[in-house]
Amino acid sequence: MNIHEYQGKEIFAKYGIPVHDQAVVTTPDAARQAAERMGTTVVVKAQVLVGGRGKAGGVKLANTPEEAEARARDILGLTIKGIPVQKVMITPASEILQEFYVSITVNRTTKDLVLMMSKAGGVDIEDLAVNRPEEIIKFPIHPTDGIDTPALERALTDVFGKPDLVNQAKDVVAKLYQAFMDLDCSLVEINPYALVPADDGEKLVALDAKVNFDDNALFKHADVEAIRSPEELSADETAAKAAGLSFVSMDGYIGCMVNGAGLAMATMDIIKLYGGDPANFLDVGGSSNPEKVVNALKIITGNPKVRAILINIFGGITRCDDIATGILEALKQIDLKLPMVIRLIGTNDEEGRAILKGAGLDSFESLGDAVERVVAAAKG
């Protein structure tokens, strides 16, 4: 689960991480009022759950409240990567002396956490990792033992240099780690973590915030689930979530209904291998519940890009005859005009194929044959 920048900053503020004042507004007039209250040059930033806001015109400076109103009006009229901008954040502009990067995420290879830091903040960290990987320092954090403070101080010195900045960064890293663990995050990121002038010298401030949460832990965090943005999920994903289906929208044209996440991913790979393009990931799970098949087919057929449907069932706990019954029930409720290819193998597969054959539907045992057929059908 992802959240907006302003929500991430609110979390940072709760943990004592330095952030600037902010106001989130939905109208140009409210943007002007926020700028008047702040009494300084402000930044007007689109709040959408996609990257590239600046390149799309979604981040603008405003020197006066009137300019803030005009910039907000322009940005609120934008659609960035398919998402209409419905709110903007107003925050004081900063005189940035240097931009750093700091994040904590999961290292799935070593099964621990990794703190990533760089002097080259403010840029796309993915590009930096490819083109200048030597500029990223990676520091391991054991998820139960916590931070090795002496080793962290040495790593921070390599990035921040000055003892005062090292101390500020050390405090923020500890708070980021605490937030990460408390909220079951998958990523906490500050970019840029900016060095700005202060009354007593210089200070480091989080000028942006990115916080992602582990979906599997959200049942423990009702307060986090409550701030989920509707724009994070497509209409199909929202419907699938309500139906208890694991579903991810994609850009292709072959609708997929599969039981088991691993088999679903393998099925998408094989579709690509045969020259097709999957429209979705959909795992109906391990239960033999015909209603899930009905819901899954309704969601798939609701996508106008879908030209053909592949149902790939490997029966274990899931019984192929129950899937077949669900398919026939779905066809009673849906006027299906798309070609549908069915592959059944495993528990009660002969019974399932017999049910389908009795209704005039063919099914395959070979996945390769099924995928070849559905790709050909999708391409007409």
Image (spheres, helix red, strand yellow):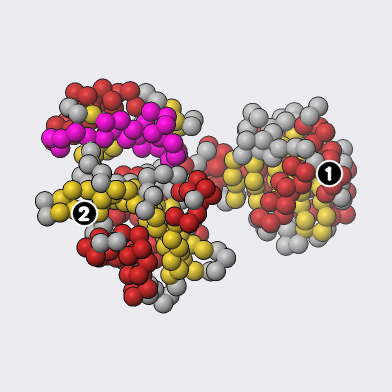
Looking at the rendered structure, the kind of residue marked 1 is Ala
Please tell me whether mark 1 sits on a helix, a strand or a loop: helix
Q: Residue at x 57, y 65 (%)?
A: 109
Location of residue 78 by image quarter? top left
Q: Which badge, 2 or 1, is on the more N-terminal residue?
A: 2
Would you place residue 36 above or below residue 364 in this image? above
Nearest the camera: 192 or 104? 192
Image x and y of residue 33, in percent: 17, 30
Left or right: 108, with 353 as reference point: left
Q: Classify 10 Å Cα crowding around label 1: few (below 14), some (14-19), many (20 and above).
A: many
Q: Residue at x 26, y 57 (%)?
A: 17
Image x and y of residue 61, in percent: 26, 31
What residue did someone put label 2 on? 203
Q: Quadrant of the C terminus?
A: top right
What residue range appears in magenta? 37-61
Residue 41 is a magenta residue: yes
Looking at the rendered structure, the kind of residue marked 2 is Lys
**Which mark identifies residue 304?**
none
Q: Is residue 182 visible?
A: no
Location of residue 378 by image quarter? top right
Residue 20 is a magenta residue: no
> What secondary structure is the magenta-colored segment mainly?
loop
Nearest the camera: 334 or 222? 222
Q: Residue at x 45, y 57 (%)?
A: 136
What residue did someone put label 1 on? 370
